[in-house]
Amino acid sequence: MAVTRAPQPVATTPAPLPVRTRLAHPALLLAGILLVALNMRACLAAVSPMVAEIQRTFGLSSTASGLITTVPVLFQGVGAPLTPRLTRRFGAERVVLGAVLVLGAGVLLRVLPSVFALYAGCVVIGVAIAVLNVSMPGLVKREFPDRAATMTGVYSTTMLVGATLAAGTSVPLEHALGGGWRASLGAWSLLALVAAVAWLPQVLRSRQEKAAVAAAAQPGKPIENLWKSPLAWQISLFMGISSLLVYTLVAWMPTILADHGMDRGQAGLVFAFSNLVQVAGAFLVPLLAGRMTSQRALAVTMAALNGLGIALLLVAPVSGAWVSAAILGVAQGGSLGLGLAFIVLRTGTAAGAAQLGGMSQAIGYLVAAAGPVGAGALHQLTGGWEATLVLMLVLVAVVGAAGLGAGRNRTL
């Protein structure tokens, strides 16, 4: 597995296609990317405030209810390795369009009056998001070769904005539409339809410029022996364990605060504040990463902030809640943005970015899916949250070590 020093990422990516039609206007491309990104977390975040109602509707146990949020994460890991093959065969533009439409179909499937449809919809949503997760870094690398890190910050921020809006508007939508949780969750299929319409010009452009795209669609050979590369594994572990920490706290942070005596309403506000702060971290950290030759210090800083926020939850869960939420928001949003930036910074071509994205996100989401379930099981075994938080601190050290390797000035 060849790993080379990268003084500045050499532009082995083919030059951007000439603007021959209005369909190739950069504003249309940017609008399409942002609308697609809005969908990539919204339908997951929208379901969280509705889990109790879904549980009552179908008479589900707590474990079965937890699967509503765990299954999509698990199938993001399962679907990620398939995406590079799809993009090579059909082209990134058509794959993204198909994934957005499938995502909208999964949202509708999830609200049908059947437990089977509920979980089948969760599977479809997870696979569709996996395809988008892996496709987008390659597209960004290809279309913005000189601003890949900056654009990574833009679309990762947009993902979190979509999640924040969805979590905050699910209950108001339920009241406004008058159709219960099904109407509220089903409404998010409209956002997928809007994104598909906005992305359609990119598919039409790729057809119009078929000859040019055919020449540009061979952006270098696939990375050989990727799964044997220490650098690829370091990036994958950084993303995977960072995601595990995020999903564990998404599932349990309000409960941890409430179990230590905080009012449940206030615990929800603290959690919402932490999610809001993530937006700033997801935007700023990739911008900083793109201006650095090595991102090792940045990776260790994100790990240290994660550790500090978790330690505050351990020693002062109520009195330090707001400070902990702010620190964790920066660390979690920043870790997401940095993990995605590593994909474009550590590869020289769009094909390489898609290939590394498939590996790192397959490992990442399979690892992340174990977080909420494992934390709940450990809490049930010990009767408290201390063991869970201590284990998370140990994992923070692993993230820091992986970040030291992933942040080196190397390319695959």
Image (tube, rainbow, N blue to C red):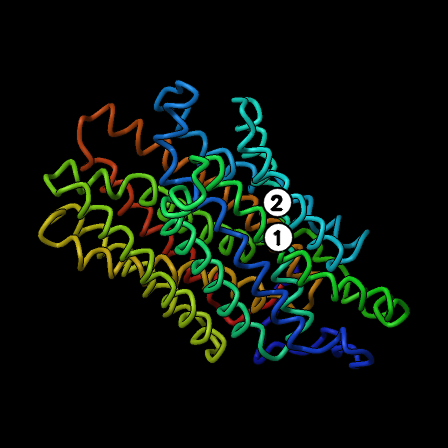
Q: Position of residue 50 (x, y in %)?
A: 38, 36
Disc 2 + disc 1, Cβ < 8 Å: yes
Which of the image's four quarters has the N terminus?
Answer: bottom right
Q: Give the camera-side residue of 279 and 408.
A: 279
Q: Position of residue 182 (x, y in %)?
A: 48, 35
Q: Amino acid at mark 2?
A: Leu
Residue depicted at 56% across the width and 37% down the height: 75
Quadrant of res 203: bottom right
Q: Position of residue 59 (x, y in %)?
A: 39, 18
Residue depicted at 73% across the width and 58% down the height: 92
Q: Amino acid at mark 1?
A: Leu
Front position among marks 2 and 1: 2
Residue depicted at 59% across the width and 37% down the height: 108
Q: Give the camera-side residue of 61 and 344.
A: 61
Return the disc, 2 or 1, that comes first in the chain's sequence: 2
Q: Give the camera-side residue of 239 and 7.
A: 239
Query: Mark 2 highlights which residue?
Result: 103
> What is the spatial separation of the Cα atoms under label 2 and label 1, in whole angstroms?
10 Å
Q: Position of residue 143 (x, y in %)?
A: 68, 72
Query: In the figure, 152 relative to 401: above or below?
Result: below
Query: In the figure, 149 relative to 381: above or below?
Result: below
Which of the image's four quarters has the C terminus?
Answer: bottom right
Q: Give the camera-side residue of 59 and 136.
A: 59
Query: In the figure, 165 relative to 345: above or below?
Result: above
Query: Mark 1 highlights which residue?
Result: 132
